[in-house]
């Protein structure tokens, strides 16, 4: 498959997001944030399943881990959250940056992908990727106020 590495990168970045949302959901006390983080993690798992299915159908390797950058962001956020009086604000801010990263890589992938079936798959998921990004951006603004 011509664009396997692009899909593999997106799967890894989405895995970063799913794991980060899961961890953040365990750390925050606000029930509405817990629900938001759970829903966002589920969105990432849906994306992972779809992109992984595309890779599997073409006999390509499916990443089982996230990225080093994602791990570093989680460690950094855990440390900041433990030192902050407002851990929810810290998590929301860092998760919004995680959404920025996924959206940026998704947009970049759409620009460079040549395989029409891969492009179609990415286009099908783009509205949800944008919606998740917009929701976390709005949450970041609410917690910044």
Image: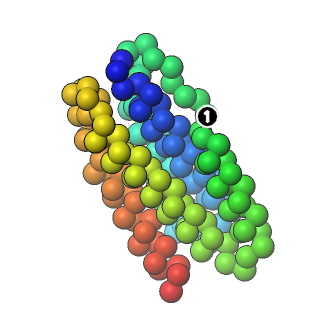
Q: Residues within 10 Å of mark 1 (few under 14, many from 20)?
A: some
Q: Residue at x 54, y 41 (%)?
A: 15
Q: Nearer the viewer, residue 26 or 71?
A: 71
Q: Is residue 18 above or below residue 120?
A: below
| Whether residue 124 can be seen here | yes
Residue projecting furthest to the bottom: 145
Percent position (x, y) of residue 69? 62, 48
Percent position (x, y) of residue 47? 41, 39
| Whether residue 42 can be seen here | no
Q: Nearer the viewer, residue 108 or 126?
A: 108
Q: Residue at x 46, y 45 (%)?
A: 44
Task: Name which quarter of the figure residue 121 lies in.
Answer: top left
Quadrant position of the N terminus in the picture: top left
Q: Residue at x 49, y 73 (%)?
A: 140
Residue projecting furthest to the front: 112
Q: Residue at x 68, y 51 (%)?
A: 72
Percent position (x, y) of residue 62? 51, 24
Name the residue beneath numbered marker 1: 65
Percent position (x, y) of residue 57? 37, 16
Q: Nearer the viewer, residue 126 or 110?
A: 110
Question: Of helix, strand and loop, which one carries label 1?
Answer: loop
């Amino acid at each position: 498959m011509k664009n396997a590495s692009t899909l593999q990168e997106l799967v890894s970045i989405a895995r970063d997001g799913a794991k980060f949302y899961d961890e953040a959901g365990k750390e925050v006390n606000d029930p509405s944030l817990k629900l938001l983080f759970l829903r966002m993690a589920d969105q990432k798992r849906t994306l992972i399943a779809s992109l992984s299915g595309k890779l599997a159908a073409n006999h390509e390797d499916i990443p089982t881990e996230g990225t080093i950058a994602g791990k570093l962001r989680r460690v950094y956020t855990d440390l900041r959250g433990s030192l902050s009086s407002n851990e929810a604000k810290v998590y929301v801010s860092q998760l919004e940056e995680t959404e920025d990263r996924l959206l940026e890589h998704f947009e970049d992938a759409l620009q460079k992908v040549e395989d029409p079936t891969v492009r179609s798959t990415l286009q099908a998921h783009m509205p949800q990727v944008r919606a998740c990004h917009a929701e976390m951006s709005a949450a970041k603004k609410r917690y910044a106020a």
